[in-house]
Image (tube, helix red, strand yellow):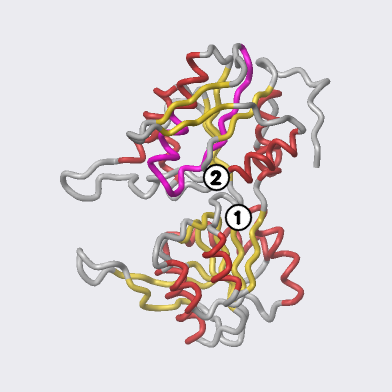
């Protein structure tokens, strides 16, 4: 879908879109949605691994959006984002917005042990100091991270996209039930279940010792002879998702759907998911999946990757024009 902006009067100058190397496909999708080409830039890595950025044209006085996921390689992608933000600030851009489909370090959101950092707060400070006037991101792991930013932003959710897709699949499902991977995701899981008008079940996880990972112990709810939609915000190493799939199957689950926003897929996630009793995996393009990993998943299950470009593109359009973003979601 192309969106024409020629006759629209923005609060700043014209929209300029810049993309890092972290998620080129989403950047190109946003560009296509807005019918605005990606602006040229050079990103060069020197032999000492230092990065250098140069804009092909001036962004002075313009409304600029820098599109960059901070997934692996995390520190390369993060530094690209920060350097591009500073480059645009020094070029006197009118307003600079960091568009970050996946924001790194969001699990480090509190000081839960002595002598540890709150890295999510550090990342927020770095983005602001580098030159961002606003930020835009999807489904952060913890809502309180919004409070770490002193600049305004739009924290969006892709669950509207996922729920629309699941709505289309419901007629082919047998007595479906939403299953959350742990109690911490219960609220979002309940909202999804309410939107789909189906029941919900939960997995209780406990940490048996302070230095051991949490393990799935109990399934609370009814999955017997039902299709099960397992939901989470992201899949990192795949432990919680694969445990949930095995537990759902042990409790009589039929077709198992794995549904989440961010495919982080740190090793050994692909192996775990491929060996889990998952029939259908549904995620988004917030993080690019390497072709070899995607092939492994497709060899073991049906894989569907939802595009988020139109969502981000529409929010960029509304931010540029000073229109409500909440109205997109009836909020």
Image mark for residue 138: 2
Q: Is residue 59 above or below residue 272?
A: above
Residue 255: image x %, image y %? 62, 80
Q: Position of residue 227 (x, y in %)?
A: 62, 79
Q: Left or right: 288 with respect to 165?
A: left
Query: Residue 271 at x, y = what percent?
Result: 45, 72
Q: Is residue 5 visible?
A: yes
* Left or right relative to 20: residue 77: left
Q: Decide: is 261 above or below 253.
A: above
Residue 301: x %, y % from top left: 60, 75
Decide if residue 237 is on the left or right side of residue 18. left
Tell me the quadrant of the picture where the C terminus can be found: top right
Magenta residues (range): 61-82
> Could you tell me if residue 177 is visible in this image?
no
Q: Is residue 158 above or below residue 238?
A: above
Query: Dot 2, crowdedness within 10 Å: few (<14), some or many (≥20)?
Result: many
Task: Based on the picture, tell me whether residue 314 belongs to the magenta stretch.
Answer: no
């Amino acid at each position: 879908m192309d969106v024409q902006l020629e006759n629209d009067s923005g609060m700043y100058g014209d929209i300029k879109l810049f993309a890092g190397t972290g998620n080129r496909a989403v950047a190109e999708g946003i560009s296509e949605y807005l019918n605005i080409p990606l602006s040229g830039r050079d990103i060069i890595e020197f032999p000492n691994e230092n990065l250098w950025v140069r804009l092909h044209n001036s962004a002075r006085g313009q409304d600029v959006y820098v599109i960059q996921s901070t997934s692996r390689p995390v520190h390369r992608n993060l530094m690209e984002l920060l350097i591009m933000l500073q480059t645009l600030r020094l070029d006197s851009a009118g307003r600079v917005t960091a568009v970050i489909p996946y924001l790194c370090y969001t699990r480090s959101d509190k000081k839960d042990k002595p002598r540890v950092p709150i890295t999510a707060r550090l990342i927020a400070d770095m983005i602001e100091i580098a030159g961002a006037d606003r930020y835009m991101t999807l489904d952060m792991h913890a809502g309180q991270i919004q409070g770490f930013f002193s600049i305004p932003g739009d924290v969006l959710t892709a669950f509207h996209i996922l729920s629309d897709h699941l709505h289309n699949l419901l007629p082919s499902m047998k007595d479906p039930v939403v299953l959350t991977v742990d109690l911490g995701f219960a609220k979002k899981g309940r909202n999804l279940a309410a939107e789909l008008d189906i029941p919900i079940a939960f997995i209780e996880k406990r940490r048996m010792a302070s230095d051991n990972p949490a393990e799935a112990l109990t399934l609370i709810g009814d999955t017997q002879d039902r299709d099960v939609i397992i939901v989470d915000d992201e899949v990192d190493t795949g432990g919680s998702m694969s445990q949930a799939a095995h537990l759902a199957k042990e409790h009589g689950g039929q077709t198992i759907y794995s549904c989440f926003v961010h495919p982080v897929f740190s090793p050994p996630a692909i192996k775990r998911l491929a060996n889990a009793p998952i029939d259908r995996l549904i995620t988004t393009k917030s993080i690019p999946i390497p072709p070899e990993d995607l092939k492994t998943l497709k060899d073991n299950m049906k894989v569907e990757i939802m595009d988020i470009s139109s969502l981000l593109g529409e929010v960029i359009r509304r931010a540029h024009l000073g229109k409500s973003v909440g109205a997109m979601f009836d909020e």
